[in-house]
Amino acid sequence: MEGNVRSEDSITEEVVEEVIRIDQHERDKKNVIVPLLLNKMVHSKDIGQNSLVSGPVLVNGRMIQSRSAAALAKLTNGIEKISMFETIGGPPKDDCSISGQDDGRNSWRAIERCVAASVKGFVIGAGLRGGLSLFGILTRLRRKSSVSKSPVKIGKTNNQALLAALRETLRYGLFLGTFAGGFCTVEETIAALGGSRRTARWRSLVAGAIVGPSLLLTGHKVRHTSMAIYILLRAAVLAARCGLKSERVGWLCKPLSWKHGDTFLMCLSSCQILTAWILKPSSLPKSYVSFLNKHGGKDASIIKGINQLAFNTKPFTALKGIEEHYRSSGLDIKLNPEMSIPCTMIHGTQGCTPHFFSFLVQAYLRSLPVYVPVYLVPALLVHRQGLFARPSPILWKSVLGIVRSSLFLSVYTSSAWAWTCFLFRSTGICKPPLIATATFPVGLAVMIEKKSRRMELALYCFARAIESFAICVTEWGVLERYNLTPPKRIDVFLFSAATAIIMHCYAQERDVFRSKYLNVLDWVFGLPDGATKYTSHLNPPSASPDAEISLPKAKALLEVTSGSY
């Protein structure tokens, strides 16, 4: 029974593989070009293992985002309709546009593309920031009753908070709208003045760098160093993937393809972040410190006590606060001012090993509320149609993700205390280098997560770690010692460099992107050269006659083989 049931994706994949297999003996795989079921010439390298075409395709005269070959065949057959939200760019250009000649239709297409990118960018920016602001307002209203009873003076009224949220929403909408529309405008201008084919290799790089300062629209007093570093790291990953494909510098980038590189990066990040949290929390954003305080599971007085003991800051003023904290929990202890290791501070009269297991259970319960919205909200937004058709697989996948990610965070925090206690007791001392050493292996907990999420987590944490380390280096006076002065808006500089690399890879090295990111970029920025953008630097494509497969033949094959359902 199982052998008779075949999906359209698998059938179409066989068709595509057969096309490539026929022509593979005649041409090198990197240079072969075949017409794939539709009226678009694509490289064989653009066809993924799941028969997904990485680039946008032309279906019935309309340019749409990447989809599986089977789904595209449905659109061509008229079984499914093309959604207006899938359409990118303007009407397809004729052959004369390939040579860089301009006409009325091409000018209108460029204007339409720039306006559409601006609108889409504004909607995305305002939507994301507005959603976060709305969440903050709801949280504020939820705490309104408790705050009103507090004698502490409130910094902002609800009306002021709402006005600030609207202002932030507008700023971020303008930022992304200006960035998207500005990029398309600069790129189209360069293509019109210098020629589409002559400028194809570098114009996206220049356009990405030019529109980088649009980050200033979020507010001239607001710094986005963490975000800029994170985006620059993402750009570095794309550049490394491009390097791995190169025959000249591929050997140089080979170490970057180490399969456990994401785990090692997470260990480095943990070393800096957790050490800074204990020894120099001012180098981390307040929101991040608040997150660590919550999931670190320890009172602020305990963190301060470890800090004073590590730096041997006497008298230990934090001891009294620690004793009061334990007393409020029903545990009456007296801490020794002459202690050499902080184990008693960390877990009172409880042993190190029992503390690890009890803390693990508590940490897991604290982690669940963090990841429930992380997995369920995308499931409701992205897979809303699938939830009605087949809810069980989607919900089960979300539940499994929640369980796994919550286990990661709980093991991460509990192992941090376990490693510090182990080294403290092994050496009998508590010093800053020892704390840094103990927090390095904590990053191994990321191996609990699935492979696709490890690098995401590692890059996010590494961006925080770099910012924290840079602040520490600055406050240590290292830059002044060598008469170095960083730019006043280094975040804008880093962001511009990152966007230049990313947009260049988007235009010239599309296969280094994951399909989900590529689809979003295609939808926002559209196509500057219609269907010819991604082969504009090549000669007009010509396929081997043996490699050709006509659309009617593909349709007939799908109809015959689908009769086994």
Image: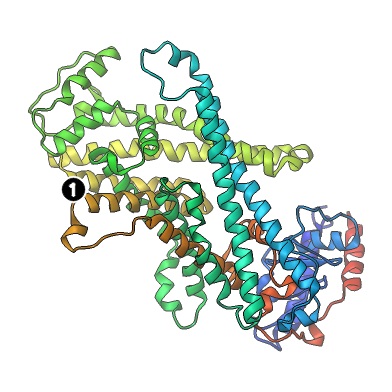
Which residue extends farthest bottom?
26
Q: Residues within 10 Å of mark 1 (few under 14, many from 20)?
A: few
Residue 478 spot, x, y in % from top left: 19, 57
State the residue at coordinates (22%, 31%).
304
Which residue is at the front of the view, 16 or 1?
A: 16
Q: According to the image, label 1 marks what residue?
A: 433
Q: Is residue 550 above or below residue 426?
A: below
Viewer-proximal residue, 87 or 489? 489
Q: Amino acid at mark 1?
A: Pro
Residue 367 x, y percent position in the rendering: 46, 32
Q: Position of residue 437 (x, y in %)?
A: 23, 48
Display coloring: rainbow
Q: Secondary structure at mark 1?
A: helix
- Left or right? Give the position of 170 relative to 486: right
Residue pictured at 91% horizontal, 59% vertical: 78
Q: Is residue 79 visible?
A: yes
Residue 66 appears in view: no
The percent position of residue 339, horizontal first and vertical second, equals: 10, 29
Determine the image quadrant of residue 251: bottom left
Q: Is 19 left, or right, of 519 in this rendering?
A: right
- Horizontal side of 439 relative to 320 (left or right) equals right
Q: Quadrant of residue 394?
A: top right
Quarter the C terminus occupies = bottom right
> Is 312 displayed left or right of 243 in the figure?
left
Compared with residue 154, is residue 176 higher up or lower down, i.e. above or below?
A: below
Question: 301 or 387, which lies in front?
Answer: 301
When the figure is inspected, residue 384 is found, relative to residue 1, above or below; the finding is above
Please name the residue shown 77% across and 60% down the image. 9
Numbered label tally: 1
